[in-house]
Amino acid sequence: MEVKARRDKIQALKQNQVLLKTNKEFQMYNLEIAKIEGEIESYESRQIAAMDDVIPVKHRVAEAQAKLQEDQTVVDGYAAELDERLAVVQNELAATEAERAEAVKKVTPQFILYYERLRTKRWPVVVSIGADCVCNGCHLVQPPSVGQMVRRNQGIVACQMCGRILFMKQ
């Protein structure tokens, strides 16, 4: 587009050159024409260089698209694997929730209320007590009577400091 406009300008200058009266004006027109021809030459050389660059760029685009396809298949495979694992975990969760619902039916409501209240505040809710009567939740020494109650399994025994439910490891 620019080259055509420049060529038209050269044609106009050459037509006006015929009407010139002095040699100095003629030389000025020749310099202007030479300058415009140099610009045309530079535009054409840049256009040729750009066309030479198009072929490698197309090749790189094709390579990038192939790599994208490979990566997309890897990502899709990974996403499918994650979906499968999620389905397995959700099934395990449903089974565990059903098992928990069955276990809750066997426990007294008073204990369930205590457990649920404690579950929102402390984790883990149930901790072991060491042989030296130390709560493994808060790491404080319990009175000997608490240790005896846990050893004899006399109902629900809670830590007197943190309130967690205590049990003795076998």
Image: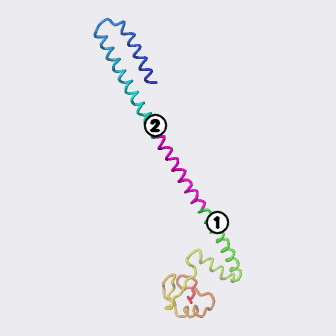
Which class describes the residues within 10 Å of circle 2: few (<14), some (14-19), or many (20+)?
Answer: few
Name the mark nearer the viewer: 1 or 2. Answer: 2
Q: Is the C-beta separation of discs 1 and 2 under 8 Å?
A: no
Residue in front for this viewpoint, 124 or 142? 124
Is residue 120 toward the left or the right of residue 44 in the image?
Answer: right
Q: In the image, residue 132 lies at what x, y percent?
A: 49, 91
Which amino acid type is marked by label 2? Val
Is 10 located above or below residue 67 in the figure? above
Find the distance from the CA under tag 1 to the CA under tag 2. 48 Å
- Residue type of the residue flagged with mark 1: Ala
How crowded is the residue under tag 1: few (<14 C-alpha within 10 Å), some, or many (20+)? few
**Residue 63 on the magenta segment:** yes
Of residues 163 and 90, the one drawn nearer to the viewer in this rendering: 90
Would residue 6 be counted in the magenta stretch? no
In the drawing, what numbered circle is on residue 87?
A: 1
**Which residue shows up at 59% across the image and 74% down it?**
120
What span is colored magenta in the figure?
A: 57-80
Picture residue at 45% right of the left edge, 40% below the top: 56
Relative to 90, say whether 68 is above or below. above
Q: Which residue is mark 2?
A: 54
